[in-house]
Image (cartoon, rainbow, N blue to C red):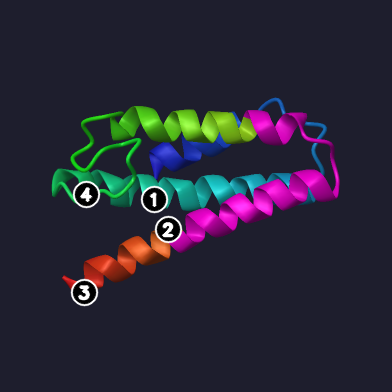
Amino acid sequence: MTRLALVILIALWGCSNWTHKDTVLETAFIAVTAIDWEQTETITHNCGELNPAIGRCGDVIPVNLYFPVVIAAHIAIAAVLPPGWCRAAFQGITFGVEATTTYWNHSARELR
């Protein structure tokens, strides 16, 4: 949880011109990405990752490099998008993708 708190703090620092909705959506994305990060550490330990950027065993891009870069890139993209529906759509869609991924990861683990 310390990692998650630190990532959220860093994410929100410098985004003072964001609306409350922007901040909530970005925080939700970061939270669900942190869950994916934790799941992926276990999945790569068992060499079962499906993301080709990471590799089945985490041998392409290390998990602890991949996720901070994804989070930083997401924050940067959201910050440069125009406020309103465009930024909200980006944040909402990417949150949905991450939430679906974490659900799938959890469901796959339950089936083992």
In whole angstroms, how far apart are the C-alphas of marks 4 and 1?
A: 10 Å
Seen in the picture, residue 70 relative to 98 is either above or below; the reply is above
Determine the CA span between mark 3 and mark 2: 15 Å
Residue wearing tag 3: 111
Residue 111 x, y percent position in the rendering: 21, 74
Q: Earlier in the sequence, mark 3 or mark 4?
A: 4
Tag 2 near tag 1, CB within 8 Å: yes
Q: Is residue 82 magenta?
A: yes
Q: Secondary structure at mark 2?
A: helix
**According to the image, label 4 marks what residue?**
42
Element class at badge 4: helix
**Picture residue at 21% right of the left edge, 44% below the top:** 44
65 lies left or right of 110 = right
- Answer left or right for 73 relative to 84: left
Which residue has dot 1 on it? 36
Specify whether 13 is left or right of 110.
Answer: right
Per the image, the residue denoted by label 2 is 101
Measuring 13% from the left and 49% from the top, which residue is drawn there? 46
Question: Residue 11: which disc?
Answer: none
Asked if the residues shown at circle 3 and circle 4 are in contact, with their CB atoms under 8 angstroms apart, the answer is no
Q: Which residues are magenta?
A: 76-100
Residue 67: horizontal and vertical position, in percent?
41, 35
Nearer to us of marks 2 and 1 is 2
Question: Which of the two discs, 2 and 4, labels the residue nearer the N terminus?
Answer: 4
